[in-house]
Amino acid sequence: MSYPPTEDQIRDVAIAALNKSQDKDVTVLVYWENDPDLMIFDPIHFAKTDYIHKKFEAYERTIIVHIGKKD
């Protein structure tokens, strides 16, 4: 997949992360060119790369998505 992801792809990451977590507030990091299916929840370290950051709210839950180009 080429970077940057489309809005639909970013939304798909957000939905997948919400489905994998039971937390009310979710933060997820994905490195797009490495493996966009590998989700890192509650990241504390970020690689030096380009990022897209999006925040979504749905059903009283919040998801913050960080998508890095590569790790």
Image (cartoon, rainbow, N blue to C red):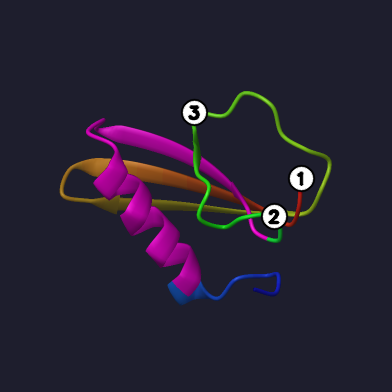
Mark 2 and mark 1 residues within 8 Å of each other at the beta carbon: yes
Q: Quick one: 10 or 56, which is closer to the camera?
A: 10
Residue with the mark numbered 2: 34
Q: Could you tell me which residue is drawn at 69 percent across and 27 percent down?
A: 45
Pointer 1 local density, CA inside 10 Å: few below 14, some 14–19, many at least 20: some
Helix, strand or loop under label 3 = loop
Residue 37, placed above or below residue 39: below
The tag earlier along the polypeptide, 3 or 2, is 2
Q: Is residue 21 magenta?
A: yes
Q: Nearer the viewer, residue 32 or 57?
A: 32
Q: Check disc 3 and give the amino acid type.
A: Asp
Above or below, comparing residue 45 to residue 16 in the picture: above
Q: CA distance from mark 2 to mark 1?
A: 7 Å
**Does residue 21 appear left or right of residue 1 in this picture?**
left
Q: Amino acid at mark 2?
A: Asn
Q: Quick check: 42 above or below 35?
A: above
| Residue with the most extreme top position | 44
Q: Would you name the residue on which mark 3 appears? A: 42
Residue visible at 78% across and 38% down? 47
Mark 1 or 3: in front is: 1
Highlighted range, magenta:
9-32
Q: CA distance from mark 1 to mark 3?
A: 16 Å
SS under mark 1:
loop
Circle 2: element type: loop
